[in-house]
Image (tube, rainbow, N blue to C red):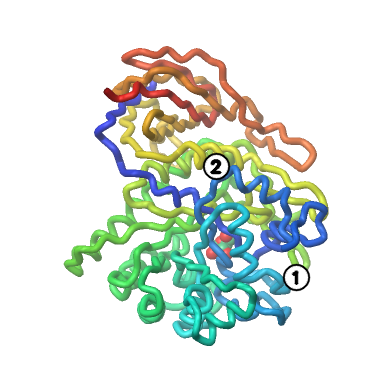
C-alpha cells in the first residue's frame, strides 16, 4: 500500500516555538564534570569548558538549556555555586560528591559559548519561596541590593536576565528530595511564583506536572496544582522516557504515539481548569524532559557512590533509539500549538547525544543526528499532515501507522520529517496539496543494524544523502527506505 500525505498551506497547526529544541544539563553523572567542564582537558578554554564539546553542541542550535536539575535541584543550595568559596557537598539525589566548581555564573558563561538561553530551576524540595526569590534577585536585579551587588562583586556587572524558570522538579515523585503532596506543592508554587513575579514581572514560569504519565496520581496532581497556580504560571511540565527492554522494536517505535496521547491528555486538563476558572488566559506545555532511558548499569553494577563525576546513566544509544528520537521530535512538531518548550534530557554524557572520554575524545551518539537536523530545519509553521498510511499492530494491541510525518513550511521551503517504522519493507509515499519546485536534499539514517551504536573510535551510524528518485508534480512520489529516519527538503515557488 502507498502512504498518502495531504498538506494544505492554509491548514497550519501553529508557528513552531523554537524552544521545542531545548535540552538539559543537570549536575548528574558526568554531564558537568568531565562533560562540558574539564579544566585540564587539552581543548579547555580559560573557563575550563571543553571546546571539543561546545563544537558538537553549537550545530544543534539549542535555544534553551534547562539547569541545574532535575532531581539534583531539590537539594541544591545555589549560594554554594557562586563566589570564591565553593563547599564540597554530598549530592543526595545521585549519591555523588558535588564540588560546586560550576554554578550559576559559570553556566551562564557556558551558555553564551553555545548560543543558548537559560531555563533555570529553583529548589522547592529542601528550600522555598525566599531562596527562589533570592536567586532571582542575584541573577536579574540590576544593582543596589545585597544580592545584586554580590553578583557584581563576583564579576558579573550586568544582570543575567534569566526569563524562564521551573518551579522545582518532579515534586510528586517519592524519590524527590522533600517530595510534596499536590496540595503542599500547589500552595508553595503559588507563593513562590508570587514572590518571583513581584521581583521580576517579565519572567515566565513552569509549574511541575506529574513526573511521568504512569504516576498513580497523574491527572489529580495536575488538576490540584493548576487550581492553585493557574493564574501564576505560563507552562505545565511533562516528562517521559521510553525504553526497549524486551527487544520488541515495533512496540518500542510506537512509543511516540503514547507521547502524543499524553500531550493531548494534559492539554485537556489545562483546558478543563481554564474553563473551571472562567479564565481568559491559556497556559501551555513544557515537555522539559524527554528521551530514551534504559537505566544503564555497567556489568549489572552501579558505579561507586560518593565520587565526583560519578559515571551514572551513560546510555549507549543504538540505531533503533535514533529512530524513536526522530519520531518523538515529529510528535513535538505536530503538537506545536500547545507544546512551546521541550528539552531533550539530557545533553552530555548523562542520557546524552554527546559523549566524552575524560581527557580524551568527544563524539556523537546515534540520537545526535535526528535532533541535529530537526532542530536546524524544523523551524517555521507546522502544517497539518493528513495521513492515510498502512498500519501494524504492536503487542499492546494498538494499531500504529508505519510512518510518522511532520511538515514544516518556512518562507521558501517545505521540509518533511518522516520515519518508516516498517523494519522489513520500503514504503512508497505520495504527497499532495502543495506545489514544490525542486528537491533540495534528502538526508536519511537507514541501513544500519537496529542495535548498532557509535563509540569514540567508530561511528557507523551516520546520516547520509539519499539519492533515490523523487517525482515532482501535482503529486510528489518517493519511497522511504525500510527502518529509516528522513528529512526531505523542497524549494517552494516564490509567491506572486
Ligand atoms: O534526567 C534525569 C532525571 O530524570 C532527572 O533528574 C529527573 O527529573 C528525572 O526523573
The extreme bottom residue here reads 146
Distance in Å between CA atoms under marks 2 and 1: 32 Å
Point out residue 261 in the picture as x, y percentages from the top left corner. 36, 48
Residue 234 in picture, x, y percent from top left: 34, 64
Q: Is residue 333 above or below residue 295?
A: above
Q: Residue at x 44, y 82 (%)?
A: 129
Q: Residue at x 54, y 73 (%)?
A: 176
**Residue 430 picture quarter:** top left
Q: Quadrant of residue 47?
A: bottom right
Question: Dot 1: what SS?
Answer: loop
Q: Residue 173, how many percent across, how many down?
A: 50, 70
Can residue 493 be seen here? The reply is: yes
Number of marks in the image?
2
Q: Which residue is mark 1?
A: 305
Label placed on residue 127: none
Q: Earlier in the sequence, mark 2 or mark 1?
A: 1
Q: Which residue is mark 2?
A: 371
| Cβ of mark 1 under 8 A from ligand 1 | no
Say which of 48 and 73 sits in front: 48
Front disc: 2 or 1: 2
Task: Describe residue 463's horizontal placement relative to residue 125 as left or right.
Answer: right
* Foreground pick, 160 / 117: 160
Question: Which quadrant does the C terminus fall into?
Answer: top left
Amino acid at each position: 500500500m502507498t502512504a498518502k500525505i495531504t498538506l494544505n498551506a492554509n491548514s497550519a497547526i501553529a508557528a513552531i516555538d523554537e524552544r521545542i529544541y531545548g535540552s538539559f544539563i543537570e549536575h548528574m553523572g558526568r554531564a558537568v564534570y568531565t562533560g562540558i567542564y574539564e579544566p585540564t582537558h587539552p581543548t579547555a578554554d580559560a573557563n575550563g569548558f571543553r571546546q571539543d564539546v561546545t563544537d558538537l553542541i553549537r550545530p544543534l542550535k539549542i535555544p534553551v538549556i534547562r539547569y541545574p536539575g532535575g532531581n539534583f535541584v531539590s537539594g541544591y543550595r545555589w549560594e554554594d555555586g557562586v563566589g570564591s568559596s565553593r563547599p564540597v557537598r554530598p549530592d543526595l539525589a545521585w549519591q555523588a560528591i558535588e564540588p560546586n566548581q560550576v554554578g550559576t555564573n559559570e553556566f551562564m558563561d557556558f551558555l553564551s559559548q553555545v548560543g543558548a538561553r537559560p531555563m533555570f530551576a529553583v529548589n522547592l524540595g529542601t528550600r522555598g519561596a525566599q531562596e527562589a526569590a533570592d536567586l532571582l534577585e542575584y541573577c536579574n536585579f540590576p544593582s543596589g541590593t545585597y544580592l545584586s551587588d554580590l553578583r557584581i562583586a563576583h564579576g558579573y556587572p550586568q544582570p543575567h536576565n534569566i526569563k524562564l524558570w521551573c518551579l522545582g522538579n518532579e515534586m510528586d515523585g517519592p524519590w524527590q528530595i522533600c517530595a510534596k503532596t499536590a496540595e503542599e506543592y500547589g500552595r508553595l508554587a503559588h507563593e513562590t511564583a508570587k514572590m518571583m513575579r513581584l521581583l521580576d514581572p517579565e519572567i515566565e514560569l513552569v509549574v511541575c506536572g506529574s513526573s511521568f504519565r504512569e504516576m498513580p496520581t497523574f491527572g489529580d496532581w495536575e488538576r490540584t496544582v493548576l487550581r492553585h497556580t493557574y493564574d501564576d504560571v505560563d507552562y505545565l511540565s511533562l516528562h517521559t522516557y521510553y525504553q526497549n527492554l524486551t527487544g520488541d522494536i515495533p512496540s518500542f517505535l510506537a512509543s511516540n504515539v503514547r507521547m502524543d496521547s499524553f500531550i493531548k491528555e494534559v492539554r485537556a486538563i489545562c483546558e478543563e481548569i481554564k474553563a473551571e476558572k472562567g479564565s481568559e488566559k491559556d497556559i501551555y506545555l513544557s515537555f522539559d524532559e524527554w528521551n530514551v532511558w534504559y537505566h544503564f548499569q555497567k556489568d549489572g553494577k552501579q558505579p561507586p557512590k560518593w565520587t565526583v563525576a560519578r559515571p551514572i546513566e551513560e546510555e549507549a544509544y543504538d540505531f533503533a533509539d535514533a529512530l524513536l528520537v526522530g519520531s518523538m521530535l515529529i510528535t513535538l512538531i505536530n503538537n506545536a500549538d500547545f507544546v512551546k518548550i521541550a528539552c531533550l534530557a539530557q545533553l552530555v554524557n548523562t542520557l546524552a547525544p554527546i559523549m566524552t572520554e575524560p581527557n580524551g575524545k568527544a563524539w556523537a551518539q546515534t540520537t545526535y543526528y535526528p535532533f541535529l537536523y530537526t532542530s536546524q530545519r524544523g523551524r517555521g509553521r507546522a502544517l497539518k499532515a493528513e495521513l492515510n498510511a498502512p498500519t501494524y499492530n504492536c503487542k499492546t494491541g494498538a494499531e500504529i501507522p508505519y510512518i510518522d510525518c511532520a511538515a514544516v513550511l518556512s518562507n521558501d521551503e517545505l521540509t518533511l520529517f518522516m520515519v518508516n517504522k516498517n523494519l522489513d519493507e520500503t514504503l512508497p509515499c505520495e504527497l499532495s496539496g502543495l506545489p514544490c519546485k525542486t528537491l533540495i536534499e534528502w538526508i536519511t539514517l537507514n541501513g544500519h543494524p537496529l542495535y548498532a551504536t557509535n563509540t569514540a573510535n567508530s561511528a557507523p551510524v551516520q546520516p547520509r544523502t539519499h539519492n533515490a528518485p523523487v517525482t515532482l508534480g501535482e503529486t510528489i512520489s518517493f519511497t522511504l527506505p525500510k527502518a529509516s529516519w528522513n528529512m526531505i527538503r523542497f524549494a517552494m515557488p516564490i509567491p506572486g
